[in-house]
Image: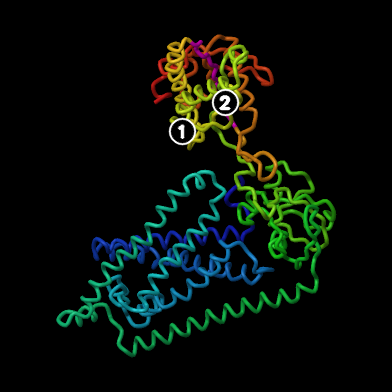
Amino acid sequence: MRGLWQGNWRVKTRIVSGLILFAYTLWHLISVGLGLFSAEWMEQSQRELSRLVSNPVGGALLYGALLTHMGLALYRLAMRRTLRMPMHEVAQVILGVAIPLLVMIHVVHTRFASNWFGVDPDMGYITGLIWDSKSGWQQATLVLVVWIHGCIGLHMWLRVVPWWRRNLPVLMGVASLFPGFALAGFLTQGRLQKLRLFDPSTGAQLRADYGFPTAEGFARLAEIHRMGLGVFLAILGFVATIYLGRKLLGARRAVRIQYVDGPEIQGQPGMTLLEMSRTAGVPHMALCGGRGRCTTCRVIVEAGLEALPTAAASEAASLAAVNAPPNARLACQLRPKEPATVLRVYRSDGQQARAHQSLGQERQMAILFLDMRGFTARTTGQLPYDVVFLLNRFFDAIVPSITGAGGTVDKYLGDGLLAVFEQEDEAASARAAMEAAMGISSALATFNQALRSEKAQPVAIGMGVHSGTLVIGEIGAAQHAPRTIIGDTVNAASRLEGATKELGVELLVSESALRAVGQDVDVLDLEILELRGVAEPMLALPVQIGSDLREILMPAAVA
């Protein structure tokens, strides 16, 4: 995982300014939503927000963030070498352009009306003024546009973070509540405040208290609004002119890039290699959206490396973190000026692109290996049907203990299996694995009782529970790659299960798994094991019958 703050100063500034604006928007939505309960609560919350941004520091922070964020967005748009981009970027651009167009009238009738006409822009004035009007619909749309724009930006920044991806469904649900809450508050107070403002007996005094503009004042505000829209549209025209001018000039100096596993493409100088790929319709993986954090867009430069610009410090750090070779570069950061031949490390084939998870991720979690003892001798001479029937009955009996504890069977290994426990952290994962081991032992006892009643020999098993670093990913040929786990932890757990046969126990739990659940290992009688293929001796707790583990460990460790 690369740091969230990697990138050039523009990227970092855009993130910081965006976070400031997101925080302001969140507070504003909550303030409007409080109108669902009380006009006083709504206005008090908004006054606190206004007080915060009306002082010199708060005002400079908010308006500086607004101008900076908008300026950097327009600069980025003007400097683009192509308008071909992922759909989330298209949505961000469209929503970002729509925001100033929609917010202009709000700013004019609050900030300008306050400064030039002495209007008190309390929420009662605003909601009553725009209720059941075209402007009201515009502001309701603005709420959705701003919030969606902010949420997309936040997601694109945090989507490489494991906890964000893990909790994304819940976060999306929570995020959808805020605009709904704000619109409900507006609907509640809009009707009430409209009635108050234009009540025949008290409305005149209330409008005077608010400093309600005269007809001439509203005409002047409308003129200011039109001027503001004209200025913004002129800025957009200027940005479009810069973009088209650079595109025409750059077309004369096209750079040729040859893909080892694909076509030869051309791009304008100044474009990143990722932009060149997208413009030419060449599939190119970029999990983080081209921000230089995930390294999934990296390429191996097989020719022309000496003519390429030197990697910036942030790009070099990202490549070093994944032990990339010296001729590796990030396509989202590399801006070729001379021809080059490159190979994509991660390639989307254009038919069924591998999922992002297929690229592999490291996780700290627990796994469980299980094997049936004496299976070969037991089934010698039996019909194939009887062998398969016994295995299926066995797995039907024990697998529910794994799934019930929150685990999944990663793979079946003939008469055994490998189970993995993907939980929110290593402690929960190890606790789930131990819970599964105890459940399997109890289920096995019940299964053996059934076998004895059928005059059949009982089944014996060995289990190994271990916790450590695992690599999860889709491993295999494209379109035929199951999701699985690899790493030294898998090998150690397998060897741990094998050692149960030598020790004559049903279960071995590694020291790392015990420590993960907070167990004091000093009070346990751990076995020192020399395991084949494992570099260092391992400490593990032998358990004669797996279901007895609960009585051995501290209550907190298996709670």
Q: Does the magenta stretch include residue 515?
A: no
281 or 550, nearer to the observer: 281
Residue 446 appears left or right of 408: left
Give the residue displayed 57% in from the left and 14% down from the top: 373
* Magenta residue span: 456-469
Residue 250 appears left or right of 102: right
Label 2 is placed on what type of residue? Leu
User: What residue sits right under mark 2 in the picture?
Assistant: 417
The x and y percentages for residue 404 are: 43, 30
Structural distance between the alpha carbons of marks 2 and 1 = 16 Å
Sequence-wise, the earlier of marks 2 and 1 is 1
6 or 433, nearer to the observer: 433
Magenta highlight: main SS? strand
The x and y percentages for residue 523 are: 46, 14
Q: Using the rendered view, name the quadrant where residue 146 is placed.
A: bottom left
Q: Does the magenta stretch include residue 457?
A: yes
Give the residue displayed 59% in from the left and 31% down from the top: 411
54 or 239, nearer to the observer: 239
The x and y percentages for residue 498 are: 61, 16
Q: Dot 2: within a 10 Å radius of its alpha carbon, few (fewer than 14), some, or many (20 or more) residues? A: some
Label 1 is placed on what type of residue? Gly
User: What residue sits right under mark 1 in the picture?
Assistant: 406
Q: Can you name the residue that lies furthest to the left here?
A: 201
Give the residue displayed 74% in from the left and 61% down from the top: 335
